[in-house]
Amino acid sequence: MAYPTDRKYTKEHEWIQVNGSSGTIGITDYAQQSLGDIVFVEAPKVGAELTAGKTFGTVESVKAVSDLFAPVSGTVTEVNEVLATSPENVNKDAHGSWIVKVTLKNPGEVDNLLSSADYEKFVAEEAGH
Amino acid sequence: MRYLPKSPSDREAMLKAMGLRSVDELFAPIPAEYRLSRDLKIPRQMAESEIVDFFRQRSRENGDGYTSFLGAGAYFHYRPVIIDSLISRGEFLTAYTPYQAEISQGTLQSIFEFQTMICELTGMEVANASMYDGSTAAAEGVMMAVRLTGRRSVVVARSLHPEYREVLATYAKHQGMPLSITGYSDDGRVNLKELEKSITPETACVLVQSPNFFGTIEDAAAIAEIAHKHGAMLVVSIAEAVSLGIVEPPREADVIAMEAQSFGVPLGFGGPYCGVIATREKYVRQMPGRLVGQTVDKQGKRGFVLTLATREQHIRREKATSNICTNQALVALMVNIFMTVYGKVGLKELAKQNLAKTAYAAGQFAKHGKVLFGGAPRFNEFVVQTSEDPYAINGRLLGHKMVGGLPLKKFYPELGNAALWCCTELTTRSAIDTAVGLVAESERSVRSAKEEVEEVAR
Amino acid sequence: MKHMTRKATRHVNQNEGLIFEKSSAGKAAWKLPPLDVPEVDTAKMLGASERKDLGEMPEVSEIEIIRHFTRLSTWNYAIDLGMYPLGSCTMKYNPRVNEAVARVEGIANGHPYQPEKISQGALHIIKTLSEQLIEITGMDAITLQPAAGAHGEMTGLLMVRAYHESKGNARKKILIPDSAHGTNPATAAMVNYAVENLKSDARGMVDIAALEAQMNEDVAALMLTNPNTLGVFEQQIHKIADILHAKGGLLYMDGANMNALVGKVRPGDFGVDVMHLNLHKTFSTPHGGGGPGSGPVAIKKVLEPFLPTPTLTVKSDGTLGFDYNRPQSVGRVRAFYGNFGMFVRALAYIQANGPDGLRQTTEDAVLNANYIRKGLEGTYDLPYSTPTMHEVVFKGVRTMDIAKRLIDYGFHPYTTAFPLIVPGALMIEPTESESKEEMDLFIEAMKSIAQEVEEDPQMVLAAPHSTRVSRLDETAAARKPVLRWKPAAAPPEK
């Protein structure tokens, strides 16, 4: 699996695509694969404050719940409402199915995240266990 | 031991197959100092006939043959015979929770029907597969509102069953959920002015019961309007399910927490009963307890499964909506069969009979004593105030093999010599007349004693 | 199919729709007696509160209801049909005399608020069962009020909290082993305690060094299942209790696995301070497709002031009654007195067994589990070689699929994927209710499936093949939940 190079990644398997002071957040293809069929995405409301490294929602499969961890701190400006009725989109196209958009509080935090190549290496190691 | 399917030679053969001499070797991991070297001090094995005798004897010491006017959250209604015939089938009685859907379709489909009928009767969109009882369902309903609103305090009607209030207090105590109590008016309903004052911006929900503990039907629409105006939810507890046959359900509520015991569940000295929570579809992910959903198998055939399990403790552990695991499946099946037997028309006629008996009884009592809260409609319970202590009156009723209304002094001291009476379709006119006669006698003797005292004083 | 089972044969099975699909106006299964009081004008009496319509409630006849539920019942597996090897669930025989005595008139129809004077029979039952459970557990006092095991856990932890509060410090957390049931952490959260995980050692037991390191004055209690969920008896139990007690903590025992101990060893003797029992596991009350349960909580003397209200008491005139005046009580956890009907059944079970029967029951339960362990240990992997008591845990890769295939062999599956510390766990608890023949069939089936996994994995993956429905689409059920029946939309009017 190739991880798009136009974004950054977390070790908790979220991606963020930064455009100026705004960021778009989703989960990676590796994450959707290990979760299996996703049945529900619980996203925060517009206006919610995210803190880098803290949970901001959950993704559920039939028999598991995974927390979503914020790659950066910021304020939610938009929520992908489509996922409320079609959570399967995340399975079909994880890198195209964003969950929330945020205004970055501290753009410097992005530098702490993994590049596409580093994330790929990280995933390869994790899968090897 | 008659329940154990092994002969001594079976046990020997099994031990031999395992290379053991004695079963004691299997208990070797338990440190010797803790192993019990004596018999438990309990009575010797009893024959089946002795066990039956023991419980028949207990039954005779337990109000067998008494006519009762008690309700207050536990109601004596007729139970159609087929309920016990059907729930006694081993396939229902001795099955586990239906996690393995392919061999549990019977339980699953019956729960799906149960959920549907509870939705129809309550006017809600979704209902769960049952909770422990009405009191814990009310507490869980409140916790649901706390999660949904993100607020923590709760306004509770004083006319909610006093034991439900106690249970809620136990649940709320360590979850940082402050409770405040709101009183009732002269008509027995929630005092709306006081209610409006007790709601704050921190109020997650208002919890009321309808018909309430006094048997009075609340104005749920008015209460909902006040709660919603302040961004709080309305949780309504229904303890007398038969009322739903003739009383409009509180459709304005956000959560309904029910006790379905009236639907075919024996009084059984207080349990097991059948709680259930019903709510709006949009709140389903915050609802506690098991849920059955419809789906299809690989061939596209309709089937049912336990669903939305991620809310529950075995997956979410400390973050679950509740720690509830067991529900009341077999009791819910009794409720389901009862609802099916009476159905659309029978439930209404049954409720009407309850209404008629109660109206007659309240009318008769009013001729001799004071029937409180006449200003609002009631279902099958009413409060009678007497001159004499109701415990004393009940003592005399017992002599006539009758159990009078529940004295309210313990729960509502402000009502003085008051008792809560209940009539169902099983209460006969002659029983009502006898009870009324005994209460009238007590009133007359108190009155004449009083007149005598006044005479002497003069 | 190559490997056919000797236990089950295909059999005609009736189809049956939802009850609503049988409904038609005018059918009825009820008949009320004529009213002996004047009829009332409901509109006048209830005004705006009057209900006009009951919506989609069914209208069917009695024979249809009998057939409906009888047909549904035949789609269920049940203990009455055969072995139910669910680990940690203790699916034992449910004696029928229990059901008979629970239905004796005065017991079934007793009102919870009837005067104590005419409730002596019920109170006598509560007292007798309480005393016998206290003797069986080796504890000092008990409450029967909790409605189920998880409810008992909550009640137990409320008492733990009240105890610590009475000493001036409620403490902050509960230690829970990683092998614990999910209810344990969920319960701790409800009582506002933080949960701290305690890892198991290489033998599947509490890691004593880890416990010593983690135990401090912030820990209110350790919640321990013993035997634990691997079926292993915590051999260092007294050391565990000592470590807790030394720092003022309490030992809570989850009694889910009490079926391995009754009559052989008593938790009260090995340092437990508070524990719950599951009457629907150990004491044979029926599971009924998922309840009702009953979760009495037995305690040591130090916790007695905190018992839920009311408690049972012997009054000065020798009669039994309830004591509501308990200022230090944790309060009420349920209306009335608990699932009384389950007390009746549990007591009848203990009476039928007596001390020798209970001991033999425990021995047979442990014998059965070990017989299965022996029978399968060459075929399936044992993650821990530690001796087991009443249940055995294997591990495998296709546990869920093997479980589903077991259905075709006429058995209910074992517990899958639990405990969480064993990847792909197969958790098997036969209970004492199985004969040698039934277990031999089970072992044979498990071996046969192991072979099928090698020879024809696709067939196992698609199992079960003999049920009225095949594997159901749980994903679709969760994505777009259909939680109730709705009438088909009426065709558009012309």
Image (tube, coloured by chain):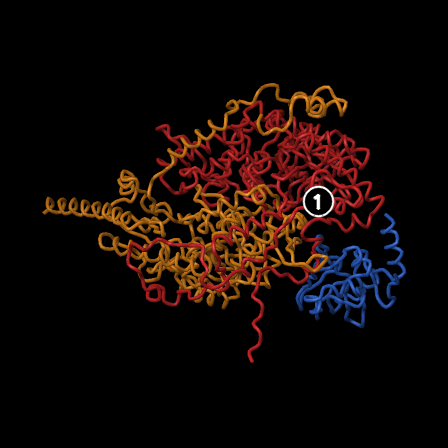
Chain colours: A blue, B orange, C red
Rendering coords of residue B172 (x, y %) = 53, 50
Helix, strand or loop under label 1: helix
Q: Nearer the viewer, residue C142 or C404?
A: C404
Left or right placement of residue C435 versus residue B169 in this view: right
Q: Which residue is mark 1?
A: C407
Rendering coords of residue C364 (x, y %) = 65, 27
Q: Nearer the viewer, residue C436 or B359?
A: C436
Q: Which residue is at the far front?
A: C12
Left or right placement of residue C229 versus residue B352 in this view: right
Left or right placement of residue B426 versus residue A119 in this view: left
Q: Which chain's residue wears label 1? A: C
Q: Nearer the viewer, residue C331 or C454?
A: C454
Q: Is residue B316 visible?
A: no
Q: How many marks?
A: 1
Residue at 60% x, 39% y is: C80
Rendering coords of residue C333 (x, y %) = 51, 44
Quadrant of the image occupied by residue B282: bottom right
Q: Is residue C303 visible?
A: yes
Point out the image quarter for the N terminus of chain A: bottom right
Rendering coords of residue C67 (x, y %) = 54, 51
Quadrant of the image occupied by residue A8: bottom right
Q: Is residue A102 above or below residue C87?
A: below
Q: Amino acid at mark 1?
A: Ile
| Residue density around tag 1, few if under 14, some if 14–19, many if 20 or more, within 10 Å | many
Q: Nearer the viewer, residue C29 or B379?
A: C29
Q: Which residue is at the far bottom?
A: C494
